[in-house]
Amino acid sequence: MAKECWRKGYTKEARKLVYDFAFNQLGVDEIHAQAWEKNGNSCKSMERVGFKLVRQEERVFEKYGRFFQENHYCLTKETWEIIKDSYWIPFRYVMDGMASFFCC
């Protein structure tokens, strides 16, 4: 995601739709995700919606040619069903003169 779009709630909005679709329409039981340990915002973001850290793996980050810890997370359907309603807190957001509802 482009840096100018960070911290505007777009990921949260998309995440809610994608996770609901994956669990309820596709019938998956788990969603897995990875983030570099040093990417604290991504790690915290996943943990806030119920992802649990399942393992860490040292891998080469090719962009820098160095080893970094990669965190591997898992979100279960059961956890998402418990968390999703408290995660989805609508607020009024005005964009291009049109009022819409987005999550915060």
Image: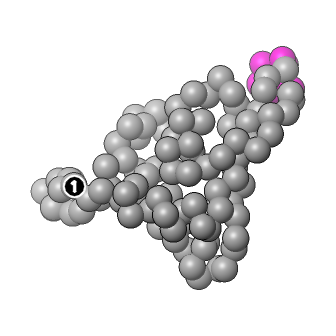
Display colour scheme:
one colour
Percent x, y for residue 5? 40, 40
Give the residue displayed 26% in from the left and 59% down from the top: 90
Residue drawn 57% across the image and 27% down it: 40
Q: Nearer the viewer, residue 28 or 67?
A: 28
Residue 1 visible to the viewer: no
Q: Is residue 61 above or below residue 45?
A: above
Lateral position of residue 17 relative to residue 19, left or right: left
Measured along the vertical axis of the image, is residue 92 above or below residue 29?
Answer: above
Drawn side of residue 60 relative to residue 78, left or right: right
Looking at the image, residue 18 lies above or below residue 12:
below
Residue drawn where x is 52% and y is 32% of the image: 41
Q: Which residue is mark 1?
A: 91
Q: Is residue 71 left or right of residue 24?
A: right
Q: Amino acid at mark 1?
A: Phe
Asked whether 74 falls inside the magenta stretch, the response is no
Q: Nearer the viewer, residue 49 or 22?
A: 49
Q: In the rendered view, does 96 fall on the left or right side of 26? A: left
Label 1: few (<14), some (14–19) or many (≥20) C-alpha neighbours in 10 Å: few
Residue 62 covered by magenta stretch: yes
**Front residue of this view, candidates 13 and 45:** 45
- Residue 88 on image: x %, y %: 36, 59
Q: Residue at x 79, y 23 (%)?
A: 68
Estimate the x, y position of residue 91 in percent, counting from the top left.
Answer: 22, 55
Secondary element type, mark 1: strand
Using the image as rendered, state which of residue 101 and residue 51 is in the foreground: 51
- The residue segment tinted magenta is 60-66
Residue 25: x and y in percent read 59, 82
* Location of residue 59 (image quadrant): top right
The total of numbered circles placed on residues is 1
- Asked if one can make out residue 63 in the rendered structure from this viewpoint, the answer is yes
